[in-house]
């Protein structure tokens, strides 16, 4: 357990909490809406600004709340869509989750994150009924170099600041290159303090990292900013284990818009894909 910084309404205080977020009150359910309140912890801190949250742990938090909302054992989470509406402010957060399209075999759940009094992110999740299709199951996505054959990846922490990146253990494959990411990440940090973190929540809480593992341009002063404004994840099977593998391809257009696409892996192999659209902007040098 390491010392972490908690951002609350009264400022910054030191606590020993090995988590991305902590609840400030028990969840409330009324009129079909689950409402939860949280404080941000330093392991959720972003990379572009130190007073923002990283989208990765925010995605994990929203996934956890979606899974906790009116669970349906016969349905599985198959698609997660995150739309960033504004700054993901570091500090107190409110998450409200509801079912917008109920159904026996197909269901749509929506979760909204509020920070500083406004909605800053909306997540939508399709839950689909499961059945036995083992007889025809096939995976055509290519395998990723296994974790045990990959080496430590200190360049990630050297390239990117912030508490979230520091909380990761990362390993990189021999064929990793700019625009062609091939690497793995894991974390010992729980998503919500004092609550068990499922494999799905842990892995979805790292998926947004894809955008920074193999950029095609230098980031920061004198280089470029390329934050993503969304995260789309499709899951053709349930992932397991603590390690998330990224097989990323990064493309950048000529008019300020880029795209990071990833095949997501666990230690059993590929399990889904993610997409992130970027707004690409030149960052002035410090001596400009």
Image (cartoon, rainbow, N blue to C red):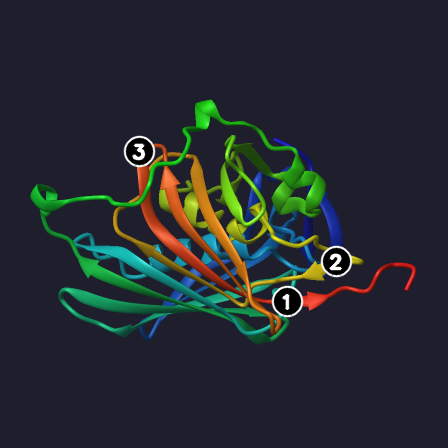
Q: Which residue is mark 3?
A: 268
Which residue occupies the extreme top position in the image?
148
- Does label 2 or label 3 sit earlier along the sequence? 2
Of helix, strand and loop, which one carries label 1?
A: loop
The Cα–Cα distance between marks 2 and 1, rounded to whole angstroms, is 10 Å
Quarter containing the C terminus: bottom right
Q: Neighbour class for label 2 at 10 Å: few (<14), some, many (≥20)?
A: some
49 lies left or right of 133: right
Q: Which residue is mark 2?
A: 223
Residue 121 visible from this viewpoint: yes
Tell me residue 154's x, y (percent).
65, 33
Image mark for residue 193? none
Tell me residue 266's x, y (percent).
37, 37
Q: Which residue is mark 1?
A: 280
Of helix, strand and loop, which one carries label 2?
A: loop
Which of pointers 2 and 3 indicates the residue nearer the eye? 2
The Cα–Cα distance between marks 2 and 3, rounded to whole angstroms, is 37 Å
Residue 33 visible from this viewpoint: no
Tell me residue 189's x, y (percent).
54, 38
Which residue occupies the extreme front position in the image?
254
The Cα–Cα distance between marks 3 and 1, rounded to whole angstroms, is 34 Å
User: Mark 2 and 3 residues: CB-CB less than 8 Å, in contact?
Assistant: no
Q: Neighbour class for label 1 at 10 Å: few (<14), some, many (≥20)?
A: many
Tell me residue 133's x, y (percent).
10, 47
Of helix, strand and loop, which one carries label 3?
A: loop
Work out whether 16 lies above or below 264. Answer: above
Q: Residue at x 18, y 44 (%)?
A: 138
- Does label 3 or label 1 sit earlier along the sequence? 3
22 lies left or right of 202: right
Choose top left, top right, bottom left or bottom right for residue 144: top left
94 lies left or right of 117: left
Work out whether 267 lies above or below 277. Answer: above
């Amino acid at each position: 357990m390491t010392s972490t910084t908690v951002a609350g309404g009264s400022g910054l205080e030191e606590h020993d909490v090995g988590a991305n977020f902590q609840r400030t009150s028990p969840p409330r359910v009324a009129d079909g809406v689950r409402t939860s309140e949280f404080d941000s912890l330093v392991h959720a801190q972003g990379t572009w600004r130190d007073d923002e949250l990283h989208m990765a742990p925010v995605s994990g938090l929203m996934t956890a709340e979606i899974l906790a909302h009116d669970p349906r054992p016969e349905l599985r989470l198959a698609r997660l869509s995150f739309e960033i509406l504004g700054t993901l402010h570091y500090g107190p957060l409110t998450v409200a989750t509801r079912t917008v399209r109920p159904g026996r075999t197909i269901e749509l759940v929506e979760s909204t994150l509020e920070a500083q009094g406004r909605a800053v992110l909306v997540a939508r999740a399709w839950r689909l009924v499961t059945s036995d299709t083992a007889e025809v199951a096939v995976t055509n996505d290519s395998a990723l170099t296994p974790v045990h054959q990959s080496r430590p990846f200190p360049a990630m922490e050297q390239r990117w600041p912030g508490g979230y990146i520091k909380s990761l253990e990362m390993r990189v494959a021999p064929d990793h290159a700019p625009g062609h990411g091939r690497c793995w990440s894991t974390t010992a940090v729980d998503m919500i303090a004092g609550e068990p973190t499922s494999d799905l929540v842990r892995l979805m809480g790292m998926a947004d990292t894809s955008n920074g593992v193999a950029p095609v341009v230098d980031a920061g002063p004198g280089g470029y900013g390329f934050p993503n404004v969304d995260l789309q994840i499709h899951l053709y099977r349930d992932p397991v284990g603590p390690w998330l593998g990224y097989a990323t391809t990064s493309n950048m257009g000529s008019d300020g818009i880029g795209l990071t696409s990833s095949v997501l892996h666990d230690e059993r192999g590929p399990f889904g894909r993610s997409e992130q659209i970027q707004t690409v902007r030149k960052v002035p040098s410090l001596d400009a």
